[in-house]
Amino acid sequence: MKKTLTVLIAAGTLLGAAACSAPKMTTEETCARIKTITSSPTSSSDKFGMTRLANQIRPIEATASAELQGPLQSIVDYLDESAKKDPDQAKVDDLKAKYTSAGQAFSQACPAPAQ
């Protein structure tokens, strides 16, 4: 009886998790959401601004297009480490290269509109 109940609970949990997962956005939708956040006046380079920006990107990264999921994770990792009270400078330097590369990938996937 315990084994059957355990199996049923596990199956229900898996089904519930699958039903609650958000659909993936297209690259265009991801770009639009990120551009909205980064154009906000609250996106500043101080520690509070970096933490706030990382927290705004996190939910988007979870449902971002496959093309932008990696770059967004690199950006969040860099912002998280940089915003720490005492960041590990070697780690920040390593993450900065990934952050720069992520910015380039984002620029290629999300070109600025022609003016």
Image: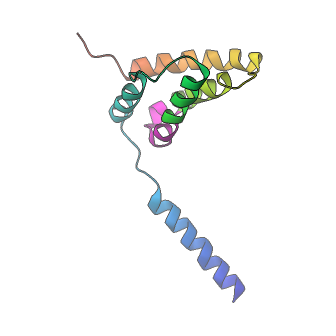
Image x and y of residue 76, in percent = 57, 29
Image x and y of residue 97, in percent = 62, 15
Q: Residue furthest bottom?
A: 1
Which one is in front, 37 or 42? 42
Image x and y of residue 99, in percent = 58, 19
Indicate left or right for 84 with 32 as reference.
right
Question: What residue is drawn where x is 57% and y is 68%?
Answer: 13
Q: Is residue 96 a member of the stretch shown in magenta?
A: no
Question: What coloring was used for the rendering?
Answer: rainbow
Q: Is residue 65 a member of the stretch shown in magenta?
A: yes
Q: Quadrant of residue 55?
A: top right
Identify whether 25 is placed above or below 38. Answer: below
Question: What residue is drawn where x is 49% and y is 41%?
Answer: 59
Question: What residue is drawn where x is 43% and y is 51%?
Answer: 22
Which one is in front, 74 or 87? 87
Indicate left or right for 91 with 96 as reference.
right
Which one is in front, 78 or 46? 46
Q: Quadrant of residue 33?
A: top left
The region drawn magenta spans 58-69
Q: Main secondary structure of the magenta part?
A: helix
Q: Quadrant of residue 110?
A: top left
